[in-house]
Amino acid sequence: MATDKQSKRRTIKKTETIREKQAKAGNKQPKKRQIKKAASKLSVPFSFVFGFAARILRPFRFVLRPFKTRPMKFTGRLLYKILGIGYFRNSWRELREVKWPSRSETIKLTIAVFVFATAISLVVAVLDYGLDKIFKQLLT
């Protein structure tokens, strides 16, 4: 009977403190740059077309060596920020996540927009006409 009560007893798990989480996160290797990931994903569709050319040009990779130096990387990052490439990349990522409405939903929503626009325009027209009459009587 005593073993039954002991087995039913709850055990409380120790939660990690913020310092423990930071220490654990500090030991991890830094992640690869997202630009490299994006470039590798972008190159997949072109690998079929340019695969042969890449194999031919492989011995001439030394030409790209100056672009891997620190000043050129800085210049690349600066152009990346100035041209707003990150904005367009993030916009494209958001567009891929959008759930587009079906054709019937689109028609219903379009009709709703026209109905509300017509109703509001009628309200504004009536108010404009009424206020016009009131101010003309007050001023004349």
Image (spheres, helix red, strand yellow):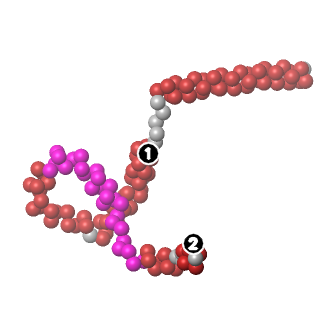
Image x and y of residue 76, in percent: 33, 61
Foreground pick, 18 / 62 = 18
Dot 1 lies on which element? helix
Looking at the picture, tell me which residue is in the foreground, 116 or 78: 116
Asked if residue 30 is among those painted magenta in the image, a careful observer would answer yes
Q: Earlier in the sequence, mark 2 or mark 1?
A: 2
Q: Which residues are magenta?
A: 26-51
* Residue 107 visible within the image: yes
- Residue for badge 1: 97
From this view, report whether residue 107 is shown above or below residue 33.
above
Residue at 77% x, 21% y: name it: 126
Residue type, mark 2 in image: Lys
Three-letter amino acid code at the position of disc 1: Glu
Q: Residue at x 36, y 60 (%)?
A: 34
**Residue that numbered label 2 is attached to:** 8
- Of helix, strand and loop, which mostly describes the magenta segment? helix
The residue at the far front in this view is 1
Q: Can you say which quadrant of the picture contains the C terminus?
A: top right
Q: Is residue 3 above or below residue 135?
A: below
**What residue sits 39% from the left and 78% below the top?**
27
Q: Quadrant of the N terminus?
A: bottom right
Q: Crowdedness of circle 1 by 10 Å Cα count: few (<14), some, many (20+)? A: few
Give the residue drawn at x 29%, y 55%: 39
Q: Tell me the element at label 2.
A: helix
> Where's residue 138, x and y in %?
90, 24
Q: Where does the image place residue 106, in percent across and percent down from the top left?
A: 51, 28
Q: Which image quadrant for residue 130?
A: top right
